[in-house]
Amino acid sequence: MLFENFPLLSRIQENVRKSGYTHPTPIQEKAIPLILAHHDLLATAQTGTGKTAAFALPILHHLASEPAAQASAQPRCLILTPTRELAQQIYENFLAYGNGLQPRTAVIYGGVSQVPQIEALHRGCDILVACPGRLQDLAAQHEVSLSQVRIFVLDEADRMLDMGFIHDVRKIAGMLPVKRQTLLFSATMPTEVQHLAQDLLDHPREVHVDPVSSPARDVDQYMYYVDKANKKHLLAWLLSQPEVENALVFCRTKHGCDRIVRDLKKKDIAAVSIHGDKSQGARQNALNQFKTGQCRVMIATDIAARGLDIEGLSHVINYDLPNEPESYIHRIGRTGRAGHTGTAITMCCIDEVKQLGQVEKLLGFRLPEHHSDWPMQITTPTEKTQVLPHSRAAMPVQVTRQGLPVPGKNTHGRSRSTVTISRNGHPVTTQRSGLAQPVRRINRRKGSGT
Ligand code: AMP
């Protein structure tokens, strides 16, 4: 099938050609005719499948086919999306696909001054791309009214849920006219999203493309077992490999992101980071540097990186395994997009063996293991028990993969407790007598101890 087969306005067809697309992706092939026919839509689509164009093109067609709205008119279409980066990305896509057409698009999100956003709203916009928080703020200030909205798109509904926006979404939906077309996109369909869909959609048509358990096909995936303390060395080595043109590195915590940037700097590797503690300006700046190739390494938390479209990303590196296995699929979906190939490398320390097993269960196969100069040596999971005052703290006990003390490393002899370092860096103790207990051995064939 070709784009020309869709009854879209010729200007939209031209803009699509200029974007370099010839054939619609599966979600576009299925969703565009349904949206053009004014149906409500419930769509499950993996990130990177071209879902933005799947809703943007028919929306532009509908709005451009109607009489032009008056200046300072209120939005006729609302697109609600969870993160600021996604909002900006969707806005830019609408500008590209709608180039030369009448409908005007505006974007509003928090973390930046509301003044230019209000000015854009006063100039009038037909399509409003928004994050829930700023939209509610501006609606409460009467700077925007949603009473004219006839098309409502809820993007990344499952992420809205994860980020605690579900009540905001319901509130915003309550401000919309009842008579409207609603399109709900979600990568997964947890029960809460299904309930939301039941409440918001009217006799929806359903489109399911590549459930989240099937990652991008063109991504080569493998993993390393490595001790937590050695991850920074392995990362620096990986980044020095010639095939790594650019890399998006995922870390579980905001502090962790900043620490990795500092560790890499010590090795003369420039990296930017993007996470929820950074101002929106700093986030956008980091993203621009990464997208334009000024900086080839970006460290990110899951929240900040969801749905980002980074053209030609060669590598995704999981410095930490995610807590939720589905996040692994979203992470690696940043590479291997739109027909390009990519590589996803995962680092796993002893504390993450369980999460690795969950990811592999979701994938339905074991990630091939590669070996590095930093093989895993610590095989005792960090124990999360009572924190002792510093005065009673001893040095961590190190053990080999066989569970024996590493010679010459455990001679402090201050107590008969086994002392290790907790995840937050505090010394912790367990009441074991003498040496460390024998440990679970890593045996990939027998299920990775998961
Ligand atoms: P999305 O899932 O909307 O974030 O899109 C993922 C990537 O696919 C973006 O870089 C789009 O520009 C690209 N894309 C969207 N539709 C097509 C298409 N029909 N052919 C080729 N690339 C596309």
Image: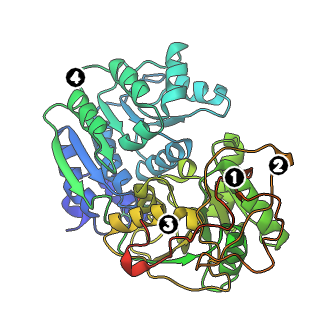
Circle nearer the N terminus (4, 2): 4
Local crowd size for mark 2, using a 10 Å CA cut-off: few (<14), some (14–19), many (≥20): few
What residue is drawn where x is 73% and y is 59%? 416
**Pointer 3: what residue?**
353
Pick the front one: 50 or 171? 171
Camera sees residue 103: no
Q: Nearer the viewer, mark 4 or mark 2?
A: 2
Q: Nearer the viewer, mark 3 or mark 2?
A: 2
Circle nearer the N terminus (4, 3): 4
Residue type, numbered disc 2: Arg
Identify the mark at residue 429; answer none if there is no mark: 1
On screen, residue 237 versus residue 390, left or right, reads left
Q: Where residue 208 appears, x then y in whole percent?
A: 22, 54
Pick the front one: 423 or 430? 430
**Pointer 2: what residue?**
392
Q: Where residue 330 appears, x then y in whole percent?
A: 44, 58
Circle nearer the N terminus (1, 4): 4
Find the distance from the CA under tag 3 to the CA under tag 1: 22 Å
Whether the residues at callouts 1 and 2 have beta carbons within 8 Å, the answer is: yes
- Is disc 3 placed on a helix, strand or loop? helix
Circle nearer the N terminus (1, 2): 2
Camera sees residue 376: yes
Circle nearer the N terminus (3, 1): 3
Find the distance from the CA under tag 4 to the CA under tag 2: 67 Å
Whether the residues at callouts 4 and 2 have beta carbons within 8 Å, the answer is: no
Find the distance from the CA under tag 1 to the CA under tag 4: 62 Å
Q: Nearer the viewer, mark 1 or mark 4?
A: 1
**Pointer 4: what residue?**
179
